[in-house]
Amino acid sequence: MAEAAGQGPKNPCVSSVTVQLEMKALWEEFNQLGTEMIVTKAGRRMFPTFQVKILGMDSRADYALLMDFVPLDDKRYRYAFHSSAWLVAGRADPATPGRVHFHPDSPAKGAQWMRQIVSFDKLKLTNNLQDDNGHIILNSMHRYQPRFHVVFVDPRRDSERYAQENFKSFVFAETQFTAVTAYQNHRITQLKIASNPFAKGFRESGDSDSWTVSPRTPLGTPAQSLSSFSPCLLKGPMEQEKDANKAAASSSRTPARLHHQLLAPPQALLPPATYRPLTYQGLYPAASRARPTPYPLPSTQADRPQADLSLSAGLGLLPPTALGLGPGQEHQ
């Protein structure tokens, strides 16, 4: 556990808070190789996932948890494949818009935060400067340090006067990374495949020459969270990312807004009043003059009652915006 320096005096509700980084050994293993994190236009989750165990909170007080990312320096980097090392390529690009990611359960009582491992598995990284989904915007080929903040929700009316006293920040040096659009160091790729439970499809592909690190389970993963992996382990890696991107929404949106964006009103799922089933003769007028066939024509499918239309047919009438997808947003 490492506290950020120069924080000054703190409120008693946060002064005794301590934080332990989960999967510390795995983070250190990545850090020795030079951790890389993928950034995409649509946003990509971090692996290893930032998870912490929190102690020392007031069990009856309310707290908000959040993260931000700060540049480690003012340089841009490139990877030299012949020497397997990162080299300085010049001065850093203009700073990206500063954003913070609130844990979706914030605010909550201290007792709830301390009861279980806190995971920022919904956090996504993007290089899209125009992103409007609340993802963390980073410059590719730049180095960053994640920071974790515990904020006491002060019930006093003039709480803004005590803003500097009501939060405590934590920095773990082993979590720093280089943002990339594609992995540069092949050893990072091997370690991510070997240690990521969602990369099961890569491990079972039989391509033993592509990686040599033995499979592992995430270190420090709580037993109660393992059940959440089981549905995804039955699918290939591409299907997992698609499902994950469909299920995950921006952490800045409230559940109510998310509900209205993903679910269309019931009347939108019904066929319009002017709906007329297509018939074989309607599509092909000449068919009415053709000789009879010994098998039923497709027009027999039009005799079904309109009420028997499946839900999928109704969903075909919905525009993409009804499903909460922004312009240009892709499934991972």
Image (cartoon, rainbow, N blue to C red):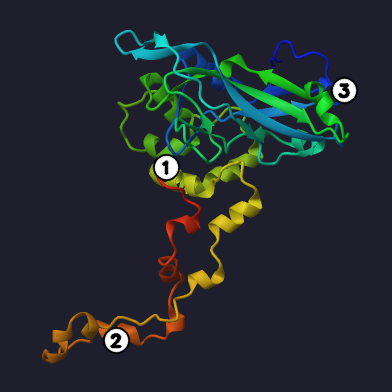
Expressed as whole percent of the image width and height from the top left, the position of residue 113 reads 75, 35
The x, y position of residue 33, in whole percent, is: 45, 14
**Going 57% across and 16% down the picture, which residue do you hit?**
174
Circle 1: residue type: Gln
Residue named by callout 3: 12
Residue displayed at 41% across by 81% down: 274
Out of 101 and 170, give the one closest to the viewer. Answer: 101
What is the spatial separation of the Cα atoms under label 3 and label 2, in whole angstroms?
A: 76 Å
Vertical arrangement, residue 69 with respect to residue 196, above or below: above
Q: Is residue 51 above or below residue 225?
A: above
Of marks 3 and 2, which one's residue comes earlier in the chain?
3
Q: Nearer the viewer, mark 3 or mark 2?
A: 3
In which quadrant of the rendered image does the C terminus lie?
top left
Mark 3 is on which residue type? Pro
Amino acid of disc 2: Thr
Q: Secondary structure at mark 2?
A: helix
Alpha carbon separation for disc pair 3 and 1: 44 Å
Q: Which residue is disc 2 drawn over?
A: 300
Classify mark 1: helix, strand or loop.
Answer: loop
Indicate the quadrant containing the N terminus: top left, top right, bottom left or bottom right. Answer: top right
Q: Which residue is mark 1?
A: 332
Please report the residue visible at 43 percent of the width from the left and 46 percent of the height from the top: 242
